[in-house]
Image: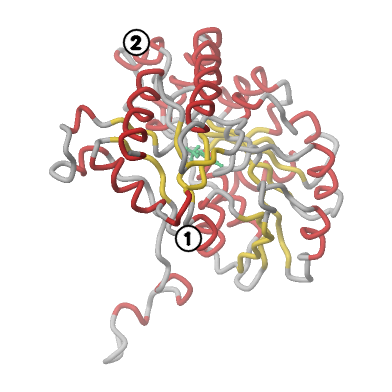
Amino acid sequence: MSEGTGIEGLIRSNLVNLNGYSARKSPETLKGELEVPVEGIIKLDANENPYGCSPKVNQALASCPDLNIYPDAGQAEFRELLAGYTGIGAEHIVAGSGSGDLIDLILRLFVEPGDEVIICAPAFSMFRFSTEMYGGRLIEVPRDKDFAIDVSMVRAAISKRTKIILMDNPNNPAGNITPQKDIQAIVDTGLPVVVDEAYVEFAGRTMVPMVSQYKNLMVLRTFSKWAGLAGLRVGYGIFPPKIADYLVRIKLPYNVNVAALVAVRESLKDLDYLMGNVKAIIAERDRLFGELEKIRFLTPFPSQANFILCSVAGGSASELYQRLRRKGILVRYFDTPLLRDYIRISVGKPEHTDALIAALREIEK
Ligand SMILES: *Cc1c(COP(=O)(O)O)cnc(C)c1O
């Protein structure tokens, strides 16, 4: 090592100044910062499932054999199970350690330093994270005031260096849906297009049936939200078989662990229970929306997902976030130019809505 450069002189130049993903704090790390005990925290900041996972998952994991054996790197059982769930052939499916793992793998496959990646901003923050990881340049096409996508603006943003277009549908953080004809118009550009359907079970609309008709359309899904498995890290993508083959070649061999596979197996056996929870969350989302509309300083946006974005009047979103936090209610605040005046609230159980609304009414006074 030459003098004066230090270890930083050896680190990849595009990573030296990377900020990293701003992950939510775990409740146990907040001890001492709040007016309530850690057990009393109401966590509405990461779109997690308030009903947890299927009890069948807990039972099966308690007596899970084979933890000493590596999982199947070829993901054969996983791919068959998900072929059954999605109705598309197993050759289209690749599993990941959360769908975040697949976003990372897709960009690893396509993006060389200097390549451009188009997103419709605001969007899921992992899109930026993985683009920068591979030295790509993020091109942000702004959504309109209702967070809708303008397809002509997306087309206009395409250059010789554009490698891929990433969209989340429903959008995180706004929760709105992009019409299928607009997505199709973007897919018709011929560029690789990723449609992240992390919230599809809450929204009910999917591009999966179209994947077999296109060579460039990819759809991502996750068990984190609808199935309550965020902590076990399991997601998957539906790809043209050629892309699936490449992804399997470049992924870490054992990227989905044995416990996650057990959890997927049991979750898919307990669909009625899990979809019952999804229904309860959808009903609660609609009630929460009505209650938020009544708060003078908030304007909620209609959502097809398990969260609601609100604009906060008077530029006080950060202060609102802090005040709720001191009361033990965690919501998502984004310290970015586009989202500085918004908070995003995950849909919890009815009692979580009640506590949140009571706190907001107190702040309103
Ligand atoms: C929550 C979320 C995911 C899920 O990520 P995992 O890695 O599967 O937990 C993916 N995409 C979007 C848009 C999300 O909001």
Percent from the top left, x then y, of residue 39?
A: 20, 27
Percent from the top left, x then y, of residue 6?
A: 28, 83
Vertical side of 227 occupied by 188: above or below: below
Q: Residue at x 60, y 24 (%)?
A: 201
Q: Quadrant of residue 213?
A: top right
* Left or right of residue 226: residue 231: left
* Left or right of residue 249: residue 227: left
Vertical side of 38 occupied by 191: above or below: below
Q: Quadrant of residue 238?
A: top right
Q: CA distance from mark 2 to mark 1?
A: 42 Å
Residue named by callout 2? 59
User: Mark 2: which secondary structure?
Assistant: helix
Vertical side of 303 occupied by 112: above or below: below
Q: Quadrant of residue 93?
A: top right
The disc at residue 336 is 1
In the orientation shown, which residue stands out farthest toward the bottom?
A: 3
Q: Earlier in the sequence, mark 2 or mark 1?
A: 2
Q: Residue at x 68, y 24 (%)?
A: 204
Q: Quadrant of the N terminus?
A: bottom left
Neighbour class for label 1 at 10 Å: few (<14), some, many (≥20)?
few
